[in-house]
Amino acid sequence: MFLVESAHWYYEDNVVENDQTLKSLSFGEFTRLLFNNSDVLRPQVANMDKIFRDFGYYKSRIPVAGAIILDEICERCLLVKGWKQSSNWSFTRGKKNTNEEDDVCAYMRGKKRVRLYVVVGVRDDTAFATLTKKEISQISWFRLDGLESGFAGLKLFEVAPFLASLKSWISNHLSPLTLSIDKPLKPPLCVWTAIRKTITTTTERRYNAKPWKQSLKVNKSAILPALGICS
């Protein structure tokens, strides 16, 4: 199913984006079409719904690792917003791949069990960008005291549970001198915003690196009839 998921990402990110005759499909819709039209998967059509549910359950239990990135005086932290307009803000994080170490996962995503590593001393003029496509729409610095009180209009459900322990960690690990540095209060700062286009963009989703899982090709002449579209 991970191969099916990777094929779905490829279809959405590269095929549909460059061909207006094709339409976007949910993962469930794509899976159903693939199972019904693939010689390899067709024998499993009767079990498809169970396979799909089991895959969703398995993914929900994959450990998550990431990073809480703080500026030089732990006044602000870096948050990312998901691709959709309705997405929440969260710390940089992602699901672990098979046999992937926690720190590697945090780095690659930084890019349910969540393990977040605290990274201190990052300059707020550091250049940030994603290595993925259609996953992150914005990267911004936010003041920690503002997160505690809640910025108006921001969805911080995935951030709020960590704020109390983060504040305690900062108090225990930073010297009083560092915490008392008298500097002007800094407002939220956006450091990266995705450019939404209808043509191919320069960022790419992180596909499985194994060569035999990279040979994704789309047979348009087979897709169109399956979608009920005349070629």
Image (cartoon, rainbow, N blue to C red):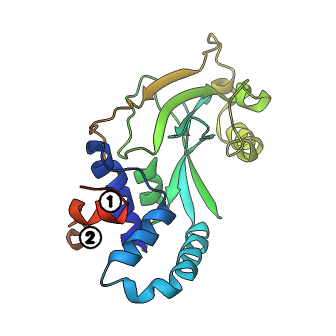
Residue at position x 61%, y 70% in the image: 61
Please give the label number shown on residue 207: 1
Amino acid at circle 2: Lys
- The quadrant holding residue 212 is bottom left
- Horizontally, residue 106 falls left or right of residue 221, namely right
Report x, y in % for residue 108.
Answer: 40, 53
- Residue holding disc 2: 213
- Residue placed at 20% from the left, 67% from the top? 215
Q: Secondary structure at mark 2?
A: helix
**Above or below 37: residue 24:** above
Which numbered disc flags the more N-terminal residue, 2 or 1? 1
Determine crowd level at label 2: few under 14, some 14-19, many 20+ residues with C-alpha closer than 10 A: few
Q: Is residue 206 visible?
A: no
Check whether the beta carbons of the residues at disc 2 and disc 1 lie within 8 A of each other: yes
* Quadrant into which the C terminus falls: bottom left
Q: Is residue 142 visible?
A: yes
- Residue under the point 27% across and 45% down: 19
Residue at 69% x, 36% y is: 155
State the image coordinates of residue 198 (x, y, percent, origin top left): 33, 35
Q: Residue furthest front?
A: 230
In the picture, measured across the screen, residue 128 lies left or right of residue 93, that is: left
**Residue 75 numbered tag:** none
Distance (Cα) linking label 2 and label 1:
8 Å
